[in-house]
Amino acid sequence: MVVGEYLRHVMEKGKAVVTSSRQLKLYSNSSSKDGSNWIYIMDFDHPAKFETLAMEKEKKEEIIDDLIRYLLHGPPGTGKSTMIAAIANLLSYDIYDLELSAVLSNANLKRLVNKIPCNSILVIEDIDCSSKITNQRERNNQGEEKKEKILETVTLSGLLNCIDGLFSANDGGRLMVFTTNHVEAIDSALLRRGRMDKHIEMPFCGFEAFKVLAKNYLGIEEHELFGRIEGLLKESSVTPADVAENLIARRGEGKDCGEECLKKLIEVLEKSIQ
């Protein structure tokens, strides 16, 4: 019995080592002839990790605890794509980036989704930009001629059926992440619980997110200027990407470069709320 437990432990450790050292890959359908085939794009080497994500610790833990189907929503620059990269790195999962505009029919969409293997993340970014999905119900009320035309492309019901089919038979080895800048533009049928289990808002940069960025870029965890920055962040609407841009220390600035970056950020924040 002890030997059996030891062997299971060794096998689990071995599997973990292989998984962690596996080169992740990015696939997309956008380059295929009719959008119905996955094409290898590149090795995926994004450095993002949950430890370095600019967001509150509690929200990170909430996401890690329930990784299946996510809708990430928020303004551009709030870290939606970086979040996807962090999830992929955490699980050692390949990414399948689905470009809906390249898919010509529901049949092609179903074929694509069925080809996604386990240990993968299906990603549909900026789904609010797809008029096929956001305006589907309006189109269906415009007469028979319009309905005929819809059958030649991807419909909302076609996407919903693919999602439901993929995860009804899911063994826990596939994830799905949608992103949007405008959650209010997406059909409610796509957003309901059971299809999108978690709706995660990626907000403008708050103080906790700023502290993560200051540590990542400047190696600073405490500073007398933090109080001023905290107050300004409460009044401003800047993204983590905007903040990070102003925390990048220039080479040759010396040991005081961190403080100079913080002062530069304060100037930017003050201008943003004027």
Image (cartoon, rainbow, N blue to C red):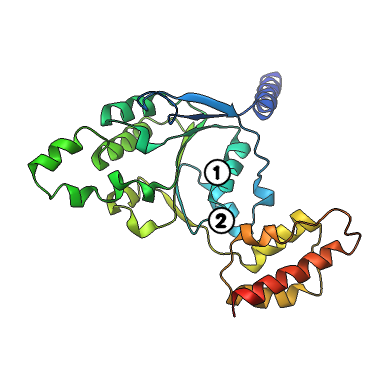
Residue occupying image coordinates x 28% and y 50%:
189
The quarter of the rendered structure image containing the N terminus is top right
2 or 1: tag closer to the N-terminus:
2
Question: Label 1, on which residue?
Answer: 84
Viewer-proximal residue, 114 or 99? 99
Disc on res. 77: 2
Q: Position of residue 210 (x, y in %)?
A: 68, 63
- Within 10 Å of the Cα at label 2, are there few (<14), some (14-19), or many (20+) other Cα atoms? some
Viewer-proximal residue, 121 or 264? 264
Instruction: State left or right for residue 246 relative to residue 274.
Output: right
The quarter of the rendered structure image containing the C terminus is bottom right
- In the rendered image, the vertical position of residue 96 relative to residue 234, given as above or below: above
Element type at mark 1: helix
Q: Find the residue positioned furthest to the bottom.
A: 274
Q: Amino acid at mark 1?
A: Ile
- Within 10 Å of the Cα at label 1, are there few (<14), some (14-19), or many (20+) other Cα atoms? many
Q: Position of residue 241 (x, y in %)?
A: 62, 57
In this rendering, does residue 17 appear at all? yes
